[in-house]
Image (spheres, rainbow, N blue to C red):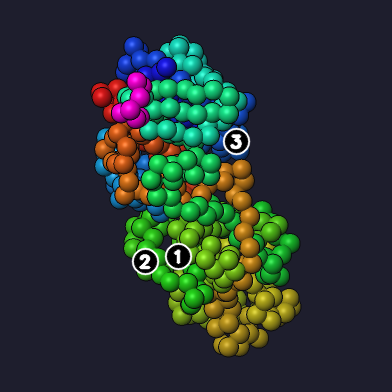
Amino acid sequence: MYDVIVIGGGAAGFYGAINLAEIRPDLKIAILEQGKQVLGKVKVSGGGRCNVTHAQFNPKILAQNYPRGEKELLGPFNTYCTEHTVQFFQERGVELKIEEDGRMFPVSNSSQTIIDCFMDAISNSKIDLIRNTIVTDILLPSPDQDSRELYKVQTKTTPFYAKQLLLATGSSSKMWNVLKKLGHTIIEPVPSLFTFNIRDPRIAGIPGLSTEARVKIVSRDIPGKKITVPLKSSAERSDELVSEGPLLITHWGMSGPAILKLSAWGARTLHDYQYRFKIQVNWVPEYHQQGLFSYLMEVKDMEAKKTVFRTHPLDIPKRLWGKLVKAVGILPDQKWADISKKQLMELARELTAGEFLVDGKSTFKEEFVTSGGIDLKEVNFKTFESRLHPRLYFAGEILNIDAITGGYNFQNAWTGSYLAAQAIASS
């Protein structure tokens, strides 16, 4: 029998168990992991470097990076935020660094540093790590049994008993099914972070090219969604699915932060649309169409004797400029003096509002994230305890919470599991 059983040997499970053991070293704690390996997402995150968190220390702004969970996480982030995560690792000899885009990694640039930190901590705290243990059912405490205060965790081989449970199993359909039997509502999962599959001559042959862009869903079948994450220039609210940031052209279409933000905020809508829709791309987000047309008219006068292809008057990659110029029918040897106003207007439209058909999606690296999980109305976010069953707690992606890429999903795991550990320790 254990005082506390943590189900799930991932980021949230380890973090919760470690913090709980340090607050209450008298408690007998076990982590049950269904597989042989633990901390799988930690290992592959950030291309094997582990994107631990994001350098956003304002709880309100931090919460705005969660399409599902923004409102619920604001209070928890005011209690346990990025600075506390940094402190946790510093106290254990792991220094973190901030990269230009705000992502935070261990200075070692290796996820193994984080894994070693966690493994050392559970060893020092004498937490039992039980691998290859698949949980098949959870039975509620029964007043008719001698063990009326204990949860029974049934596995394929043997039952375990505990006074309190912390569930941190991520996007596990098996555990969600177990929770359905306990009366919890599960929001069916759909992919959240994904890239767009696009076959189009305007971006063919230039994979690896990256530039700032503003991207908007324009299919009229898709209803508006509010995106509250700060965009490039300022925090703003939009009634459209729109995003701004670096856009990466790939062999299969488009990726990068601008696309991933759209995939996160539009996760459920784009799923309903079966991942076939149109986007509008502004490759020069500092301009609108009419303003860019006026600027191109000035370029026409100043660079009259030069060819359009070679002039490259905008801050976008030269190869992309050539592709877009060609797309509106301008020939390689055409000079600015020979370009009509109609052609310039078409070029301005292509640069600021070019439409692309998205036909399918691809997983973003190994960082598969889903939108879905336990209905947030059934969780007390002061403690991360179930509102249906006492002494049953949740943390991480088992909840209907997900974020954009950049370390935010891990921060949700750290915050939730820490607050759950605090609540368990004081009960």
What kind of residue is marked 3?
A: Val
Q: Earlier in the sequence, mark 1 or mark 3?
A: 3
Q: Earlier in the sequence, mark 3 or mark 2?
A: 3
Report the residue at 30% width, 34% height from top. Answer: 390
Q: Secondary structure at mark 2?
A: loop
Q: Quadrant of residue 227?
A: bottom left
Residue nearest the observer in this picture, 109 or 424: 424
Q: Quadrant of residue 84?
A: top left
Report the residue at 51% width, 49% height from top. Answer: 370
What span is in magenta?
A: 141-147
Report the residue at 49% width, 76% height from top. Answer: 221
Residue nearest the observer in this picture, 7 or 256: 7
Q: Secondary structure at mark 3?
A: helix
What kind of residue is marked 2?
A: Ser
What kind of residue is marked 1?
A: Val
Specify the principal SS of the magenta part: loop
The answer to whether residue 146 is magenta is yes
Residue placed under numbered mark 2 in the picture = 238
Horizontal relation, residue 202 to residue 2: left or right: right
> What is the residue that sits farthest to the front in this orientation?
144
Residue placed under numbered mark 1 in the picture = 242
Residue placed under numbered mark 3 in the picture = 44
Q: Is residue 270 above or below residue 336?
A: above
